[in-house]
Amino acid sequence: MKHILFVALVVIVGVAAVTPPVLAHHSYSAYDGDKPVTFKNATLTEVRLIYPHSILTFEVKDEKGNVETWSGELNSPAQLSRMVGFKRSDFTVGNAMTVVAIPSRTGQKYVAYSKITFSDGREFVILAGNPNGGGRGAVAP
């Protein structure tokens, strides 16, 4: 009986030890939710459908016509499928798109995607509302 109690205690302590880092991992505090950005005429250049977060990279021209490369993260492929009906074939290198995203607070060219609209009209709302202010909604910023 003492052995079972010891094992149960070890399991409880182990779960308690990893819970805060797991919850912190899903924070959007690294992004500036008060300053969403929109990139028009972006071209998808790399698709990494991986776990725990997929990563899309795109190129877009700045105000001076210089090409900038931006990357950002999305949910895992399975979560995207459940949340927004995503299929792997939806994200193809070379696709033209408009991106609405939440920029990194560090100034790096890295974002948390909020909404992606492809040139054919397909739209994916991934993160709606201000991520620093709470939950999902129906409309992206």
Image (cartoon, rainbow, N blue to C red):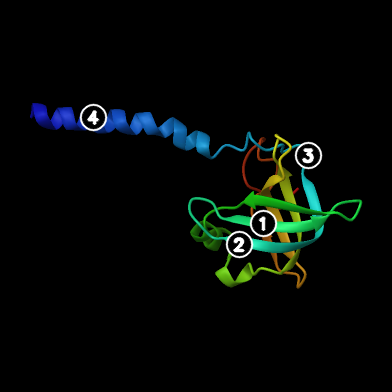
Q: Position of residue 115 (x, y in %)?
A: 71, 55
Residue farthest to the right?
A: 64
- The residue located at (63%, 33%) in the rendering is 29
Determine which residue is flagged by label 3. Answer: 35
Question: Which comes sooner in the sequence, label 4 or label 2?
Answer: 4
| Cβ atoms under marks 4 and 2 closer than 8 Å | no
- The residue located at (58%, 66%) in the rendering is 85
Question: Which comes sooner in the sequence, label 4 or label 1?
Answer: 4
Residue farthest to the left?
A: 1
Mark 2 and mark 3: Cα distance apart in space: 25 Å
Residue farthest to the front?
A: 66
Is 114 or 92 nearer to us in this picture?
92
Mark 1 and mark 3: Cα distance apart in space: 20 Å
Based on the displayed image, in which of its 4 quarters is residue 93 positioned? bottom right
Determine which residue is flagged by label 4. Answer: 10
Question: Which comes sooner in the sequence, label 1 or label 3?
Answer: 3
> Identity of the amino acid at label 2?
Val
Question: Which comes sooner in the sequence, label 1 or label 2?
Answer: 2
Q: Position of residue 35 (x, y in %)?
A: 78, 39
Mark 1 and mark 2: Cα distance apart in space: 7 Å
Mark 3 and mark 4: Cα distance apart in space: 44 Å
Seen in the picture, residue 54 relative to 87 is either above or below; the reply is above
Determine which residue is flagged by label 2. Answer: 47
Q: Secondary structure at mark 1?
A: strand
Q: Secondary structure at mark 4?
A: helix
Determine which residue is flagged by label 1. Answer: 57
Is 83 or 28 nearer to us in this picture?
28
